[in-house]
Image (cartoon, grey):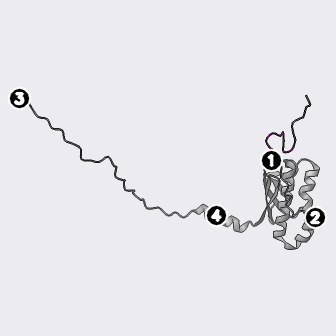
Amino acid sequence: MPRVKTTTKKSTKSSVKKPKKKVVKPRKIKINSRKTQKEKVKKEEKYIEAVGRRKTAIARVRIWTKGEKGIMINEKPYDLYFSTIDLQKIINAPLELLKLKEKFKITAKVYGGGIHSQAEAFRHGLARALIKMNPDFKKKLKRAGFLTRDPRERERKKPGLKRARRAPQWSKR
């Protein structure tokens, strides 16, 4: 039997892959009709906005000059959201001080903290918004203490203690 030579062809291709060219598609420019509608709404409905804070509670308060008068907090009437009379007094304090109760539509988004600090954050934000509306209100609101942000925060827990400063009960034996 004659011997047949078989040759194997060596691959000349390297193992390095060539980067693919990216195909850039032209972007279509659309005129967004929704955006123009939102701009029209913003022009028609004007409001003044301010942020109030207390501990970890944050309130974003808006005062509307037009619309149904009243106070809405997190899309609920304020007397349902803050059920106690003390909290409702905290909410109404800046308006009663300036004799502006039932003059505006006030909406707020409140989150964080407890119910009492949320009420105080709302009061702080409302006072700030009233000043943006009329700078003459600043003197009365400042004297009442509604513009001062209460800086007190809860102290962090320390290692080896039960709370920030509360040590475990000591026993002699």
> Residues in magenta?
158-165
N-term mark: 1 or 4: 4
N-term mark: 1 or 2: 2
Q: Position of residue 59 (x, y in %)?
A: 80, 56
N-term mark: 2 or 4: 4
Q: Viewer-proximal residue, 118 or 164?
A: 164
N-term mark: 4 or 3: 3
Q: Where does label 4 land, which residue?
A: 37
Judging from the image, what secondary structure is the residue with disc 2 in? Answer: helix
Q: Where is residue 131 in the image (x, y as percent from the top left)?
A: 84, 69
- 159 part of magenta stretch: yes
Judging from the image, what secondary structure is the residue with disc 4 in? Answer: helix
Q: Gap between marks 2 and 4, in whole Å?
A: 42 Å
Judging from the image, what secondary structure is the residue with disc 3 in? Answer: loop
- Specify few, some or many for label 1: CA neighbours under 10 Å numbering under 14, 14-19, or 20 or more: few
What residue do we see at 84% from left, 47% from top?
114
Q: Do the residues labelled 4 and 3 touch (CB within 8 Å)?
A: no
N-term mark: 2 or 3: 3
